Amino acid sequence: MIDVRDNAVPMVDPLTGTALLEYASALAYNIGPRPAGHEPENRARTYIRKTLQAMGIEEIKAQPFQTPDTWGYAMSTPLALSLGGLLISRLGWPGRFVASLLGGTAAYLTWRAASGLRQPLAQYAPQKTSANLIVRIPSAGRPKHKVVLLGHTDTNRHRDSFSTERKGMLPQMTTALMGFQAAGAVAQVIGNPWLTRAIGVAQLAGLGAILADERGPYVDGANDNASAVACLLGLANLLNAKPLEHTDVWIVFTGAEEPGLVGVHTLLDEYGDQLMGAYFVDLEMVGRGQLVYVAEHSGFSTLSSYTPDPESVALVERTAIAHPSSRVSGKKLMILEEIAAVRRRGYKGICLVGLDSDGWPANWHRDTDAIGNIHPEALERAARFTFSMLQTLDAD
């Protein structure tokens, strides 16, 4: 039991694994797959809003935006540009010049997609409406700090590229695609038709692999990322009952993370000035395994790594020292998530993630990502450690 106010009747502890599992079950089992911009994702937001209102939280800001529903557009569009350039290269020097520009542009766009940056051509993909839900819990006293907790509502597809055998090669495969696109641009400059044909065949094979990867069904997303939403709901309940003394907390349930971090980019577009200096903490796949913080993210290419800022790392490590039973430490990981957008735009941020016994997030983009594979104790560990981080910062 937690006594949330002086002389108050104790409230039921909102961070127990049992309580958090109920939230995760409502999303992953009752609603199921939640593709970005589709009706189930909207139902998830409705559930989150009603749950927050039942806690007594009425100030819930909806921030709608347009988005593609899958990252396949971000990866296939550059390849289509490059292949189109190779086709028009037969039109003499003008065609080769345009083809060279398209090949270079394609390599750059693929790098952006693998790095978590906004996609300039995303607006030309089929669009659907998603949204962020934003809750602000002001400090009880004079504010000295601001924290933004992130957890996304949408789910990805079952992908062969994330099989046990293939996921470790994703950065190398994406880098190879970028290399073929850049090589296509060079082939146009030197005017080598045999090299152009060979590069075209390699790119066509890459496009086929991307399209094949898009054939899988959308998954329930119990770990990725109903687990994070559950933790954020529990934390919202606790913080609403007893706000921190000197720390304003924003809790943001982001939409459309999977198609390219669209929700968090939209958040920063509108609120970036207010959030400069804030600590961003992203919870990803915390429903199973050992909780860690990502000390270095590879991104999805060998040219797109990023790291948390030193202040956020110090905050996590101070909290881990104060709570040794959490056994939280830093790990390097092949992952691309919302801290990519946060860090590349100059904000402070760090990601907490659960790692299974094989050193990877459990059931990542696989059809096994179901509620039966979630461990309540892992949810509770993630929520409690996150709250401990907030308390550590608040005491400064």
Image (cartoon, rainbow, N blue to C red):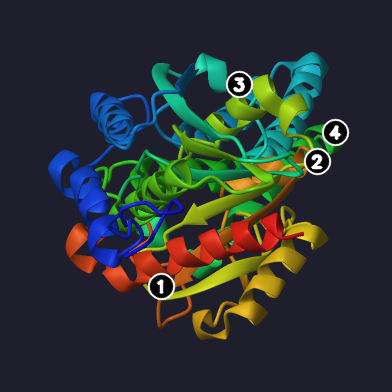
Badge 4: residue crowd in 10 Å (few <14, some 14–19, many ≥20): some
Q: Are marks 1 and 3 in contact (CB under 8 Å)?
A: no
Element on which disc 4 rests? helix
- Placement of 65 over or under 206, stated as above or below: above
- Determine whether 364 is above or below 184 in the image: below
Q: Amino acid at mark 4?
A: Val
User: The C terminus is located in which quarter?
Assistant: bottom right
Image depth: mark 1 or mark 2 in front: 2
Q: Classify mark 1: helix, strand or loop.
A: loop
Image quarter hosting the N terminus: bottom left
Q: Which of the labelled discs sits on residue 346, or is there none?
A: 2
Image check: 98 left or right of 270?
right
- Residue 242 x/y as whole percent: 48, 47
Question: Quadrant location of residue 266?
Answer: top right
- Report how far apart the C-alphas of labels 2 and 3 lie in the structure: 23 Å
Q: Residues within 10 Å of mark 2 (few under 14, many from 20)?
A: few
Reading the chain from its start, which is encountered first: label 2 or label 4?
4
Check disc 4 and report the residue beneath it.
Answer: 189
Q: Which mark is residue 165?
A: 1
Q: Residue furthest front?
A: 7
Looking at the image, tell me whether mark 4 or mark 3 is earlier in sequence order.
3
Q: Position of residue 264 (x, y in %)?
A: 58, 34
The residues tagged by marks 2 and 4 sit, at their Cα atoms, a distance apart of 36 Å
The one nearer the camera, 108 or 19, is: 19
First in residue order: circle 4 vs circle 1: 1
* Front position in the image: 198 or 47: 47
| CA–CA distance in space, label 1 to label 3 | 31 Å
Provide the residue designation for mark 3: 121
Q: Is residue 183 visible?
A: no
**Residue found at x 38% / y 72%:** 164
Which of the pair 300/210 is nearer the observer? 300
The CA span between labels 4 and 1 is 37 Å
